């Protein structure tokens, strides 16, 4: 079969990336996302890219539909069935105020209001034993009421179901039978972790989004099959892998963040191919910058994830690639606050009006305007020259801000523009600090893998701020997220609470519990994906007895007790700097990750096509390292073959991005067409 | 003490720093306590720290002035407890007596004015070189889980009548001296707690925070130069001060006053504790006057000047004029506090202080209440204001070891212009404090939590309705001793500008056999099968309830927030059998009720 296809319906555009195995090349299209019907928009993309569906081997689909359902609060009419006495858990939450001094602080409205939260008599005790059996007659009568009310989705969440799911299983089975066509989900089908609020919130969110996503998938699947598609169709999940449709329908919230994960997946695949065992994946776009850690090709996932943000949103217990996102992108605005302090972002000019230089009505200077004013990007080669930038306007807006802070003339303008870059870099650096130093990792041991429209432009500056020695820019950085999806494997994560002190006996029980989880997952995944080889990764959530936070520690089926203990202690020491050797350790939970390889395009064939080498143009570019401007060569990326190398300074331009190489750096083009920038250990940048 | 003249005192600052560099240094400084916050939350051993966030991290200058503080710590510590601790250390040891590598800790009630569990630890930050210069202190305050005294948990007493019954005192003692642990002191700590392993784990985490913070501060000095860092700190203070002054100047000048009260100190059970406060706004300065509050009380609800009066005034000040500014010395310069010695919030060091924080939310809320007429578009009705502490301890039937679990209640917050009251949340003295999940309590302790419900009609009626309180019912499954401290049963969370008061909290225990007793402030033995009913108050309403949109009342009834009876008698809304508001009947009803006033 000829094609491997990945399609991503984002907020504004639907991107489609396909690899044509016959021609050995990438096909990319972009079209406006059609909100009234995602399916039509997507089918248009296939037609526009001239992809013959009977010739498609694999189709992967990412969508913002689930997150949009929450943002717009337009999900299903949902009811929640809870243990008697506890229907208000969804509204009481954890009682915390994430913003301390706000008299009006509130979280976003609940997905299920109080009159549709219904209590049923049943009770499981804290140890998992049945204290009060499920009142089936009462549940029957509730089911009849729900039918009468026209409920479209039902979440079931009982106390202590993480320890014993019998009542939830029984209730869900009864409701499915009595309410055909209604989306029914129980919390313990999604997560076997303790904490009733988080689990209830997860089940409610899945019920709320379930019917819409299921409907979209069903229609898309049948349209594609109608046009002759006969192979496998996957959904992109937030954990960095794809899942089969059956699982996607049951767990719509596993698809919450399916867009942004593509870049991390791609970074992991490239890092492995290039032999880089520790990288920071750095993606900078128009409004935000994101980063994540990839070690030995593996990225970390985290749970819970807060829909709508930690300050005002609600939690769902699904594995989401551990990405930190901060408000620093090309459109981030530089401004003075009421006290005259200069700040860059998080306010963003977005794409409309956009930066001042877009000439679409923006008046406040942005990071993009600063880059233009400093010569780091050029007015004529933005997006391959398709969009001409207004350089005088950008400079004017920066001079206006500079004047308020006492910087004058062209030198003052440069200093101000450099200040905007430096403050933006500071925000990006804070994101990197969150994923490295705050977890006991040293950024100097990592390579910065930069992509997105702004990643190559700021990677070098950021690396210098964080003392990171090397920056790598992959091919096609502007559309790297879509390429990452083409490279994604299938993946499922499952966690269950497992409270035991770490003893010989517990180690044996743990291995046994993992064996059972593996067997169950194998069976489920074989049904979903066919007879594919699966790889399992076991991690135990462990902590010193009495602590709350745990450290995910890798274990193997043959790990001995001392091995498990020392693996935990060394991770703990790395992360927190001290360890109380010999203190009792406890296991809190078990996480099992299953992956299955999926066919992917060979990376060699994703190398940028190289034209004839040409003499570089030159322009004046400001560099903080010299606190001044340098006459700098400007290369076109497709004039640089593998093996090319040179000292900085340099600018490398391509369609979707521009790479900056500093005057103390050295760069080369690697075997997969990647740009590698080595930062030499020069005197530390002094910003003033 | 909090005077504008402070701004140039101390270190002479000659260097100027450009505004971009100053901003970069400010962010780098703010990042230090925030990182230490995270480390402590992750590495602490006792739930009161990692769940309740009962700790604070910050950097103070050589005079004890706050440079910055972590945003994760609870509001109770915005008052400069860290700086106060350092000043006591300077008084005890002298500046020359504090050397590089020292780590000092203190819970001195005479200076900190808080219960003895709150222990501040700090280490000096010295510049390198041949003549090390003192640059400041990295300080971490942590609630120590137990430091002896008459009850498990030390502070959780309702009957103590002096501070010596509440645990051991460490006044500015060196834990480390010149880079070496003082082993004798470690042994004293270890032998004066009921939970040595947990406490020593927390102490280790607190110590690691001090040392890491110190090194991070030195890293910034190395990167930017000492002069630039100092200039940036001065600039930070000046700007926070200017922001606070600007906000105060927007409040009309005048003398504002308000009153409230607490039920009792749990010893003199029939005597209320009066909270009569005056706030004077003049230009860009604000004075909080506590001259008319009750005197020091016999029971453990006292606090010292810093832990009581200053803390409450600063928390209220943050809510009113500086909610978004990171706390630092500058932001509090326009705030003045008047409090004679010997009041219950300026008590002697020997006074019992186990429950020192119990009155704080009420004092804070009363200060805010003063400004109802000054800031009517901002101030909210009273919040439930009560910690509602209910802890239990005993021997776990599973582990056969001593356990101790302490919870607090969340309740309704007040309504404000355009907003129904939010919640349920903990009090104004809490911030990002998470409630302990039912499943965690039931897995670890012998308890079954039967229900946790919003209380119908508990929010104060108003054009904007107050938030709802909660009722929690628990059954105990093993013999244990329960400590309860619940107040505000007498003084209801107030409505403002025509809004009504909210329901008050209460605690009762039903023993096996059906006998019920009140248990608001007490320590009582519980038998398996005994049941505790604990409620929290709601939030006060805002504006005349007869002006509330009938559709909102209809929704409140549908959701069970408001009863049909209250809809009619409080809001004048007439509902049909299906609980739909009847427009014409409602108009007539409201007219009639207005006429009857």
Image (cartoon, rainbow, N blue to C red):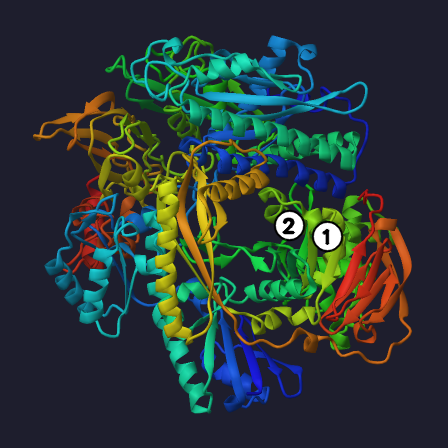
Q: Position of residue B363 (x, y in %)?
A: 40, 25
Residue at 56% in and 22% down: B121
Q: Quadrant of residue B472?
A: top left
Q: In the rendered image of this protein, does residue B305 appear above or below residue A526?
A: above
Contact between labelled residues 2 and 1, with CB atoms less than 8 Å apart: yes
Could you classify mark 1 by the number of other residues whose Cα lies within 10 Å: few (under 14), some (14-19), or many (20 or more)? many
Q: Is residue A51 visible?
A: yes
Q: Position of residue A542 (x, y in %)?
A: 45, 43
Q: Which label was assigned to residue A462? A: 1
Q: Position of residue B159 (x, y in %)?
A: 29, 14
The residue closer to the viewer here, A559 or A535, is: A559
Q: Quadrant of residue A66?
A: bottom left
The residue closer to the viewer here, A247 or A212, is: A247
Q: Which label was assigned to residue A432? A: 2
Residue at 36% in and 22% down: B153
Q: In the rendered image of this protein, does residue A381 appear above or below residue A94?
A: below
Q: Is residue A627 visible?
A: no
CA–CA distance between discs 1 and 2? 9 Å
Q: In the rendered image of this protein, does residue B257 appear above or below residue B40?
A: above
Residue at 46% in and 91% down: A227
**Which quadrant: the N terminus of chain B?**
top right
The residue closer to the viewer here, B397 or B586, is: B397
Protein chain holding label 1: A
Protein chain holding label 2: A
């Amino acid at each position: 079969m000829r094609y491997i296809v990945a399609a991503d319906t984002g907020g504004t555009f639907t991107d489609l990336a396909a690899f044509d195995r016959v021609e050995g090349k990438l096909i990319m299209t972009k079209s406006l996302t059609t909100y009234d019907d995602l399916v039509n928009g997507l089918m248009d993309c296939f037609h526009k890219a001239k992809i013959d569906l009977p010739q498609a081997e694999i189709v992967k689909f990412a969508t913002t539909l689930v997150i949009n359902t929450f943002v717009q609060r337009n999900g299903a009419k949902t009811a929640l069935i809870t243990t008697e006495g506890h229907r208000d858990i969804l509204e009481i939450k954890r009682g915390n105020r994430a913003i301390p001094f706000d008299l009006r602080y509130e979280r976003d409205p609940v997905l299920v209001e109080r009159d549709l939260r219904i209590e049923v008599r049943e009770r499981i005790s804290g140890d998992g034993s049945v204290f009060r059996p499920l009142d089936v007659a009462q549940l029957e009568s509730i089911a009849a009421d729900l039918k009468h009310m026209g409920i479209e989705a039902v979440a079931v969440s009982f106390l202590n179901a993480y320890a014993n799911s019998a009542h939830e299983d029984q209730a869900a089975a009864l409701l499915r039978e009595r309410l055909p066509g209604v989306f029914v989900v129980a919390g313990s089908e999604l997560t076997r972790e303790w904490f009733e609020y988080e689990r209830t919130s997860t089940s409610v969110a899945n019920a709320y989004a379930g019917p819409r996503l299921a409907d979209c998938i069903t229609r898309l699947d049948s349209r594609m099959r109608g046009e002759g598609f006969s192979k496998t169709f996957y959904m992109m999940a937030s954990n960095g892998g794809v899942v089969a449709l059956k699982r996607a329908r049951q767990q719509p919230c596993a698809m919450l963040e399916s867009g942004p994960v593509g870049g991390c997946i791609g970074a992991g695949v490239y890092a492995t191919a290039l032999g880089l065992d520790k990288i920071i994946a750095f993606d900078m776009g128009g409004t935000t910058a994101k980063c994540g850690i990839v070690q030995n090709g593996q990225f970390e996932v985290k749970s819970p994830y807060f829909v709508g943000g930690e300050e005002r949103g609600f939690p769902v217990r699904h594995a989401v690639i551990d990405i930190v996102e901060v408000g620093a992108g090309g459109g981030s605005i530089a401004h003075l606050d009421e006290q005259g302090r200069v700040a860059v972002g998080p306010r963003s000019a977005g794409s409309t009006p956009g930066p001042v230089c877009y000439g679409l009505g923006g008046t406040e200077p942005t990071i993009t305007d600063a880059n233009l004013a400093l010569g780091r990007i050029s007015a004529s080669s933005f997006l391959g020259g398709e969009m001409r930038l207004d350089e005088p306007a950008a400079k004017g807006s920066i001079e206006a801000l500079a004047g308020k802070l006492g910087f004058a003339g062209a030198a003052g303008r440069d200093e101000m523009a450099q200040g905007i870059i430096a403050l933006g870099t500071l925000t990006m650096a804070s994101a990197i600090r969150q994923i490295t130093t705050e977890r006991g990792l040293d950024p100097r041991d990592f390579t910065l893998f930069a992509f997105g429209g702004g990643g190559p432009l700021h990677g070098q500056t950021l690396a210098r701020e964080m003392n990171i020695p090397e920056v790598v820019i992959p091919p096609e950085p502007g559309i790297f997220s879509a390429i990452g999806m083409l490279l994604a494997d299938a993946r499922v994560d499952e966690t269950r609470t497992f409270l035991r002190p770490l003893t010989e006996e517990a180690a044996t029980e743990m291995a046994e519990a993992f064996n059972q989880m593996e067997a169950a997952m194998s069976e489920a995944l074989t049904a979903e994906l066919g007879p594919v080889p699966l790889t399992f990764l076991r991690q135990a959530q462990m902590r010193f007895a009495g602590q709350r936070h745990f450290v995910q520690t890798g274990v193997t089926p043959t790990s001995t007790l001392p091995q498990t203990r020392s693996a935990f202690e060394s991770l703990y020491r790395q992360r927190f700097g001290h360890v109380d050797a010999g203190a009792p350790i406890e296991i809190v939970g078990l996480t099992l990750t299953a992956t299955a390889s999926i066919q992917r395009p060979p990376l060699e064939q994703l190398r940028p096509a190289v034209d004839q080498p040409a003499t570089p143009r030159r322009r004046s570019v400001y560099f903080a390292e010299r606190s001044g401007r340098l006459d700098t060569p400007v290369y076109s990326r497709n004039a640089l073959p593998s093996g090319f190398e040179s000292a900085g300074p340099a600018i490398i331009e391509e369609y979707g991005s521009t790479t900056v190489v500093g005057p103390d750096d050295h760069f080369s083009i690697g075997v997969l067409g990647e740009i590698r920038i080595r930062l030499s250990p020069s005197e530390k940048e002094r910003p003033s | 003490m909090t005077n504008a003249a402070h701004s140039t005192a101390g270190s002479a600052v000659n260097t100027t720093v450009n505004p971009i560099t100053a901003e970069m240094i400010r962010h780098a400084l703010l990042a230090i306590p925030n990182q230490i916050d995270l480390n402590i939350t992750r590495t602490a051993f006792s739930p009161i720290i990692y769940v309740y966030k009962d700790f604070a991290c910050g950097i103070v200058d050589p005079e004890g002035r706050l440079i910055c503080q972590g945003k994760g710590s609870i509001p109770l510590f915005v008052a400069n407890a860290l700086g106060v601790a350092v000043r006591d250390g300077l008084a005890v040891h002298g500046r020359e007596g504090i050397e590089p590598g020292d780590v000092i800790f203190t819970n001195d009630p005479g200076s900190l004015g808080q219960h003895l569990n709150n222990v501040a630890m700090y280490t000096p930050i010295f510049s390198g070189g041949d003549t090390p210069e003192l640059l400041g202190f990295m300080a971490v305050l942590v609630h120590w889980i137990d430091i002896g005294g008459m009850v498990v948990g030390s502070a959780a007493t309702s009957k103590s009548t002096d501070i010596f019954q509440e645990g051991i005192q460490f006044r500015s003692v060196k834990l480390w001296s010149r880079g070496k642990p003082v082993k004798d002191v470690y042994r004293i700590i270890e032998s004066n707690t009921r939970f040595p392993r947990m406490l020593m784990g927390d102490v280790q985490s607190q110590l690691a925070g001090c040392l890491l913070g110190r090194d991070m501060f030195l890293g910034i000095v190395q990167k930017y130069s000492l002069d630039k860092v100092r200039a940036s700190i001065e600039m930070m203070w000046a700007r926070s001060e200017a922001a606070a002054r600007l906000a105060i100047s927007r409040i009309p000048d005048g003398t504002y006053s308000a009153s409230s009260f607490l039920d009792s100190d749990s010893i003199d059970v029939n005597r209320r504790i009066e909270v009569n406060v005056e706030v004077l706004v003049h230009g860009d300065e604000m004075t909080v006057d506590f001259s008319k509050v009750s005197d020091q009380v016999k029971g453990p609800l006292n606090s010292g000047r810093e832990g009581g009066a200053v803390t409450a005034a600063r928390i209220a000040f943050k809510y009113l004029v500086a909610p978004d500014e990171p706390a630092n010395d500058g932001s509090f310069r326009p705030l003045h506090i008047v409090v004679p010695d010997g009041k219950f919030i300026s008590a002697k060091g020997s006074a019992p202080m186990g429950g020192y924080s119990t009155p704080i939310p009420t004092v804070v809320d009363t200060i805010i209440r003063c400004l109802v007429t000054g800031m009517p578009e901002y101030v909210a009705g009273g919040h439930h204001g009560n910690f509602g502490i209910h802890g239990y301890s005993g021997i776990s039937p599973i582990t056969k070891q001593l356990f101790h679990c302490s919870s607090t209640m969340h309740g309704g917050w007040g309504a404000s212009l355009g907003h129904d009251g939010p919640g349920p949340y903990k009090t104004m003295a809490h911030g990002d404090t998470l409630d302990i999940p039912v499943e965690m309590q039931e897995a670890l302790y012998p308890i079954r939590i039967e229900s946790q419900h919003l209380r119908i009609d508990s929010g104060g009626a108003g054009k904007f309705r107050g938030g709802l309180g909660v009722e929690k019912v628990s059954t105990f499954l093993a013999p244990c001793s329960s400590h309860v401290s619940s107040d505000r049963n007498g003084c209801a969370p107030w409505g403002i500008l025509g809004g009504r008061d909210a329901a008050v909290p209460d605690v009762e225990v039903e023993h096996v056999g059906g006998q019920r007793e009140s248990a608001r402030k007490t320590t009582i033995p519980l038998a398996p099968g005994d049941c505790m009913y604990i409620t929290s108050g709601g939030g006060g309403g805002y504006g005349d309830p007869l002006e509330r949109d009938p559709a909102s009342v209809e929704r409140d009834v549908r959701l069970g927030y408001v009863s049909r009876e209250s809809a009619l008698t409080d809001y004048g809304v007439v509902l049909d059998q299906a609980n739909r508001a009847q427009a014409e009947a409602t108009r007539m009803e409201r007219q009639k009720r207005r006429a009857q006033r």
